[in-house]
Image (tube, grey):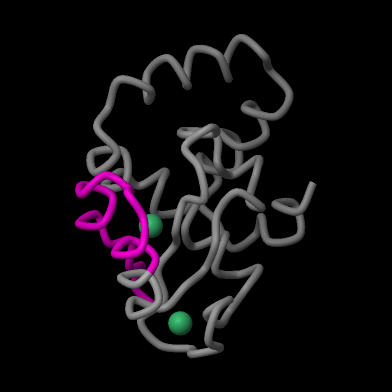
Amino acid sequence: MLFTVFADLFPKPFQDHVYRLQADTQYRTDFQAEVNPMPIEIWESTPKWRLTAKFRKLINRTCERCGRTQNLEVHHKTYRFKGIEILYPQDLEVVCNSCHRGIHQLSLWPAQCHQARLAYPQ
Ligand SMILES: [Zn+2]
Ligand SMILES: [Zn+2]
């Protein structure tokens, strides 16, 4: 699993969380049941999401649309894996804030996703 490549860059409790999500079906089901009812902007304000966004940015360090390296955010292509995105990093896209705004203006994504800007301290 790709996370293992970067695991040392994350706090131990988060590493344990990711490995349990992967290996323990009941833990994964329970965690998804906890996250699912949360509005997306609440989930995106949690440390677990912020670490997921950090992980995603380690895979792609530039905007996947224009190549910028500043003001990077993480965009959900779908919400199919809400809560367990760390296991499905291909469903997330690293974009700069400018491209991110464009994505949401061109689509019918929920306004709250647009507001929940996923900037992670660089
Ligand atoms: Zn961009
Ligand atoms: Zn987005």
Lateral position of residue 75 relative to residue 37, left or right:
right
Q: Give the residue at the far right of this rendering.
A: 1
Picture quarter with the C terminus: bottom left
Q: Vertically, is 26 above or below 44?
A: above
How many marks overall?
A: 0
- Residue 24, image x, y percentages: 68, 17
Residue pictured at 56% horizontal, 59% vertical: 55
Is residue 95 a member of the stretch shown in magenta?
no
Look at the picture and state if 60 lies above or below 21. below
Residue shown at the point (54%, 68%) measured from the top left: 57
Q: Which residues are magenta?
A: 103-122
Please tell me in which quadrant of the rendered image residue 40 appears: top left
Measuring from the top left, give residue 30's x and y in whole percent: 49, 12
Left or right of 34? Residue 87 is right
Q: Quadrant of residue 41?
A: top left
Q: Nearer the viewer, residue 76 or 24?
A: 76
Q: Residue at x 41, y 76 (%)?
A: 72
Majority SS type along the magenta span: loop
Residue that extends furthest to the top in the rendered view of this protein: 26
Does residue 106 show up magenta in the picture? Answer: yes
Quick check: which quadrant has ligand 2?
bottom left
* Viewer-nearest residue: 16 or 74: 74
As drawn, 28 above or below 19: above
Residue 102 percent coordinates (x, y) = 35, 72
Q: Residue at x 36, y 56 (%)?
A: 107
Give residue 58's position: percent from left, percent from top.
60, 70
State whether residue 23 is above or below residue 63: above
